[in-house]
């Protein structure tokens, strides 16, 4: 099997890892006329750095062969899919060629389990070591770590990578034991704890390190959770995420909607969850991390432990807490403005800065690109008061849902978080 065939198989197999999200753009190929292309090459994806830069990454698996037989995984041992494996030298050469041709700025590397967790982690570390130490590679490296691997291998991975991730896999321990019995729930948590200790121990070293050099230890860790493969409710998912953020200092929890696979186990649902459920969980996650909401508050806008799929979680909360509104945009404190549907965290900061100089009118909010149709029922401004009894009207939800649907239809583009 030649290198291009391996790349086609192993880049496709890596698409199930949600922790490297693509940016949105229509595919345009220069072969059809014109100059330039947005059609991605095999294995190249886009991710966003903490400072907002979009960076191109080579995203592949070392191999899609695996000795584990996790029921939900397309690459499980009993799955009938084409298999391939890069050697360390092939993968290093591939990354360097892409980099020299200015096609990528970094590498995202994961793998199925070969022989054992230690052997697999050793191969992943070898790729990173070759890039960093032999070839002086200073680009971004994100390594998926194997939780059952020896601590010294995880330590070396942290010294070589910018970011590490350990997949929690499923939101419930009972589900992991049922669908992936070869994986150790306690071992995953233990490895996350060790990484947090090492990341925090090197925090001062990272602050003093030069930006041009790789960090002395990874800047953070993330995880991924499959949604819809078990009976976990959204309340359970968000409760698990809250615990992970608090216990292990994670940078992100990624949510991946379960996708049915060929010859699936009877333990798995025959239909995938609606994709909008994954989107609502990301929105709820944002509320947890940046807007001061608790899981119970977020879930108060849903039913039976599930988020409302028709409206975003902040709007669902506001509709179920109408007594909290309307808020005066010129007087309300930051923490309360953050709860107004349609106001993002950056917009709230701009409002707080602007109102120091003069009372804000609705036209001022329009200049800040606030969706006025969405905020009108919930805000007071110098020239605006909501219509009498608007907040109490039974059809307010229907009106707001209709307006959101119209706006989305008028502007067919990548969904915003709020």
Image (tube, grey):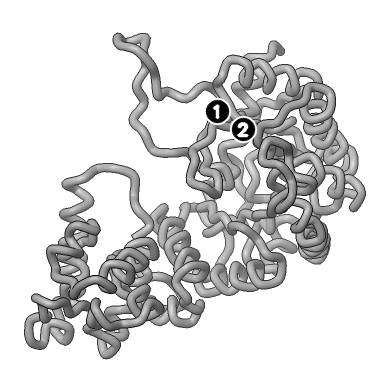
List the residue tagged with mark 1.
44
Instruction: Give x and y (percent) for residue 161.
Output: 74, 41
Label 1 and label 2: CA atoms lie apart by 6 Å
Residue 80's quadrant in the figure? top right
**Residue that appears at 66% across and 56% down:** 169
Instruction: Give x and y (percent) for residue 41.
Output: 51, 21
- Residue 362 lies left or right of residue 59; in this view the side is left
Residue lying furthest bottom: 323
Quadrant of the drawing holding the C terminus: bottom left
**Residue that appears at 35% across and 71% down:** 314
**Residue that appears at 60% across and 67% down:** 241
- Count of labels in the image: 2
List the residue tagged with mark 2.
59
Quadrant of the drawing holding the N terminus: top right
Can residue 309 be seen at all in this image of the molecule? no
- Residue 103 lies left or right of residue 308; in this view the side is right
Residue 267's quadrant in the figure? bottom right
Instruction: Give x and y (percent) for residue 312.
Output: 34, 66
**Do the residues under discs 1 and 2 have CB atoms within 8 angstroms?**
yes
Instruction: Give the label on residue 181, or none.
Output: none
Q: Judge whether 279 appears above or below 58 on screen.
A: below
Q: Which circle's residue, 1 or 2, is located before the other in the chain? A: 1
**Residue that appears at 20% across and 67% down:** 374
Q: What element carries label 2?
A: strand
Q: Judge whether 351 appears above or below 168 on screen.
A: below
Q: Residues within 10 Å of mark 2 (few under 14, many from 20)?
A: many
The one of 348 and 98 positioned closer to us in this rendering: 348
- Residue 259 lies left or right of residue 407; in this view the side is right
The one of 407 and 213 positioned closer to us in this rendering: 213
């Amino acid at each position: 099997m030649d290198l291009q065939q391996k790349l086609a198989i192993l880049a496709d197999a890596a698409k199930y890892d949600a922790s490297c999200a693509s940016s949105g753009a229509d595919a345009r190929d220069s072969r059809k006329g014109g100059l330039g292309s947005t059609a991605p090459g095999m294995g190249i994806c886009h991710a966003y750095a903490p400072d907002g830069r979009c960076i191109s990454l080579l995203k592949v698996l070392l191999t899609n062969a695996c000795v584990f037989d996790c029921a939900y995984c397309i690459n499980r041992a009993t799955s009938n899919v084409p298999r391939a494996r890069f050697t360390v030298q092939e993968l290093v050469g591939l990354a360097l060629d892409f980099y020299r041709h200015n096609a990528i700025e970094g590498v995202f590397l994961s793998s199925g389990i070969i022989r054992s967790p230690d052997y697999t982690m050793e191969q992943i570390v070898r790729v990173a070591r070759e890039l960093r130490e032999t070839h002086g590679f200073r680009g971004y490296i994100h390594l998926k770590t194997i939780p059952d691997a020896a601590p010294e291998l995880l330590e070396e991975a942290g010294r070589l990578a910018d970011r590490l991730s350990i997949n929690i896999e499923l939101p419930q321990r009972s589900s992991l034991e049922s669908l992936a019995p070869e994986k150790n729930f306690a071992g995953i948590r233990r490895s996350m704890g060790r990484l947090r200790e090492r990341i925090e121990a090197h925090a001062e070293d990272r602050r003093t390190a030069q930006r041009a050099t790789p960090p002395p230890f990874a800047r953070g860790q993330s995880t991924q959770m499959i949604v819809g493969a078990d009976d976990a409710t959204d309340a359970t998912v968000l409760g698990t995420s809250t615990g992970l953020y608090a216990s292990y200092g994670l940078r992100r929890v990624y949510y991946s909607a379960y996708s049915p696979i060929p010859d699936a186990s009877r333990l798995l649902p025959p239909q995938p969850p609606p994709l909008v459920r994954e989107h609502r969980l990301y929105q709820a996650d944002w509320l947890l991390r940046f807007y001061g909401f608790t899981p119970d508050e977020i879930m108060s806008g849903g039913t039976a432990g599930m988020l409302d799929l028709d409206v975003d979680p902040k709007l669902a909360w506001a509709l179920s807490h109408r007594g909290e509104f309307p808020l005066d945009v010129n007087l309300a404190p930051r923490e309360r403005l953050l709860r107004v549907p349609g106001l993002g965290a950056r917009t709230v900061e701009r409002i707080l800065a602007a109102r120091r100089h003069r009372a804000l009118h609705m036209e001022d909010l329009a200049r800040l690109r606030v969706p006025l149709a969405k905020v009108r029922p919930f805000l007071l401004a110098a020239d605006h008061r909501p219509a009498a009894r608007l907040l109490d009207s039974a059809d307010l939800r229907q009106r707001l849902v209709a307006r959101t649907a119209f706006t989305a239809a008028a502007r067919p583009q990548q969904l915003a978080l709020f």
